[in-house]
Image (cartoon, grey):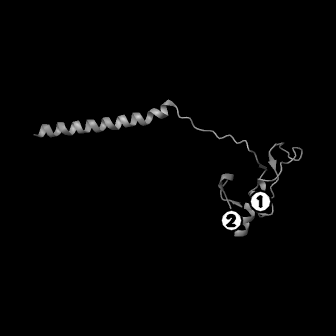
Amino acid sequence: MQKYGGDLDEAFIVATENGYLRLGVEFLKAGLTPYVNAERVASRRPYSIDVDLDYLIQEDSDVQFDYFERTEDIKIKTYNPSWVDRAIPIVMLAFLLSVLILAIAGAFAIVKGLV
């Protein structure tokens, strides 16, 4: 694994077919790995698991993983639209409709003035 920028969100993976398969196997194994004792983990994270990726990452790579964590209690934030969010489409539709009506009325006024 390598980084192409200055931040971890700019990392990419260059691997052979077998390398990708091994990475997939390690992540699948992580789903079944028992939790690590809190005494063994410096950060005392209760959901830490052991995932062995060291043999997959080259020595000169600047990508590193501090720890792996597995939890079944992931909170997904849902978006609840406010009254303003619901009113915006109605206001825009009313505005466009009034522009259309005024354009038609203006066109009739121009045509009536020419006749």
Residue furthest right in the image: 39
Quarter-wise, where is residue 101 in the image?
top left
The reply to whether residue 16 is in sight is no
Q: Are marks 1 and 2 in contact (CB under 8 Å)?
A: no
- Residue 23 to residue 39: above or below: below
From mark 1 to mark 2, how far is it between C-alphas? 17 Å
Residue indicated by mark 1: 26
Give the label on residue 14, or none. 2
- Residue 11 to residue 84: above or below: below
Q: Amino acid at mark 2?
A: Val
Among numbered discs 1 and 2, the one appearing first in the sequence: 2
Mark 1, mark 2: which one is toward the viewer?
1
The reply to whether residue 49 is in sight is yes
Image-based side of 80 in relation to 38, left or right = left
Image-based side of 91 in relation to 7, left or right = left
Q: Quadrant of the C terminus?
A: top left
Along the line of sight, which residue is nearer the eye, 66 or 104? Answer: 104
Q: Amino acid at mark 1?
A: Glu
Q: Residue at x 39, y 36 (%)?
A: 92
Q: Residue at x 65, y 55 (%)?
A: 10
Along the line of sight, which residue is nearer the eye, 6 or 106? Answer: 106
- Residue 72 to residue 91: above or below: below
Q: Position of residue 96 (x, y in %)?
A: 34, 38
Image-based side of 75 in relation to 85, left or right = right
Q: Badge 1, how many Cα within 10 Å: few under 14, some, many 20+?
A: some
Q: Position of residue 104 (x, y in %)?
A: 24, 39
